[in-house]
Each structure stands twice: as C-alpha cells, then as structure tokens.
Image (cartoon, grey):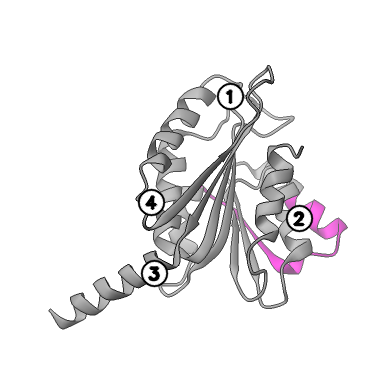
Amino acid sequence: MKNAQQFSHEMILSVNLEDGIFIDATAGNGHDTLFMAQHIGKGSKILAFDIQEQAILQTRQLLQNNDLEEKVTCILDSHAQISNYLNEKDFVRLAIFNLGYLPGSDKKIITTPSSTLEAIQILLDRLEKKGKIIIVSYYGHDGGVEEKDLVEKFIVALPQKEWSVLKYQFINQINCPPICYVIEKKALCQIVLMKNLRKGLSD
C-alpha cells in the first residue's frame, strides 16, 4: 500500500500536467516541488512557497541539482499570500500542502490553522474545474492535532454538489501516521460560478 506522500504524488499525476499553474504551498525540503517539476509540461509553471529561508534555499538547490530551476518560482512568503502572486485571471490546476514542521529544523516553527485555512480558501476560489488541492497532514507534534482537526472540519463541510473530498488514512498504525486529504473541484462548480458571474453582469 502507498503511504500518504506516495498517494499524494499519485494524485498529482492524475491531473492534466500541460499548460497549468501548480503550487507547492509548503516547499519544505523541496521534494514535492521537484516531483511536480519532473512531470509538468512545458507550458506549466510552479510557485513554491515557504516562510523559512532554509526551506527556500534547500528547494532551489534541489531543483538546480536536477536542472529544473527554470520551471519553478521559489517564494519566501506565507501561503496565505498566494493571491499576491497570481494574476487576476489566473486559475490553479493543483496545489499541495504538507502540514507540520520542516524536517531537520526548529520544530517550533510549524504551519498554523489560520494561515492554512486562509490559503485553502484562496485556492478554492482560484481552482480550475477538475483541479485538486492535496493536503498531507503530519500531526504528531504540538499543535498538529489542532490544525488537522480544524482543516478536516472545514473541508468536510464543502458542498458535495461542487466538491469531492477524499481522506486517505491508515487506521491501524501507531505514532500518528500522516493523513492525505484531496479536494477536487467538480465541473458543476465552474458552471455555477459562470451563471453567478453572468447574473452579476446583467444586474
């Protein structure tokens, strides 16, 4: 069976990899950024965010080592500021989060529910139809369970007619095995948005 990270990479490969915007909302050591850079098409681009300079430097180095740095823009900023780096008409094909702390660094610097939920909401508004948001929650640290519970409470309430939400989890493992959540925007959601837009223009 695939672990949470392997399953998340399988979900990345399930979307159209050509001519899209991809976001790594928590660059960390750069492994997800590298995986996407290895698979996206020429017309696609990746934005990789992290609040720690160490993470951005490690991600850049990993990309350079694999001659893939031209596919990625590394951004030293919170994922809550994603909208500042997108044009008004940009839509996102896929975004991925790894919630927790940067492996090998200060465990007190962690993702927080407030910025994570803000970023998820921004991405929900910017997601293409059939686009995906992948959230891998590592919650074995102080504050991890609180963030996991708040994120799950938020996404489980998304309307079924507009969103598909999946939870991938091992239930007989000890030591808080990571959980992978996947949110997919249904085609119907895009239709509803277009109808609302037309209605607004006619008012």
Q: Which mark is residue 193?
A: none
Q: In the displayed structure, does residue 156 sit left or right of residue 132? A: left
Magenta-span inclusion, residue 93: no
Q: Amino acid at mark 4?
A: Gln
Looking at the rendering, the stretch of residues picked out in magenta corresponds to 59-78
Q: CA distance from mark 3 to mark 2?
A: 30 Å
Residue lying at 48% horizontally and 69% vertically, measured from the top left: 91
Q: Which residue is mark 2?
A: 34
Foreground residue, 203 or 181?
181
Q: Position of residue 139 (x, y in %)?
A: 58, 26
Q: CA distance from mark 4 to mark 2?
A: 32 Å
Question: Does 80 sit left or right of 23 as displayed?
Answer: left
Crowding near the residue tagged with mark 1, few <14, some 14–19, many ≥20 C-alpha atoms within 10 Å: few
Query: Which callout, 4 or 2, points to the residue nearer the camera?
Result: 4
- Asked if residue 29 can be seen in this view, the reply is no
Neighbor class of circle 4 (other Cα within 10 Å; few <14, some 14-19, many 20+) is few
Residue 63, image quadrant: bottom right
The image shows residue 9 at horizontal and vertical percentages of 71, 51
- First in sequence: mark 3 or mark 2? 2
Q: Residue at x 86, y 59 (%)?
A: 66
Label 1 residue SS? loop
Compared to 34, does 153 lie above or below? above
- Mark 3 or 1, closer to the camera: 3
Q: Which residue lies under the disc numbered 3?
A: 190
Q: Nearer the viewer, mark 1 or mark 4?
A: 4
Where does label 4 land, which residue? 160
In front: label 3 or label 2: 3
Q: Disc 3 to disc 4, how far (Cα)?
A: 14 Å
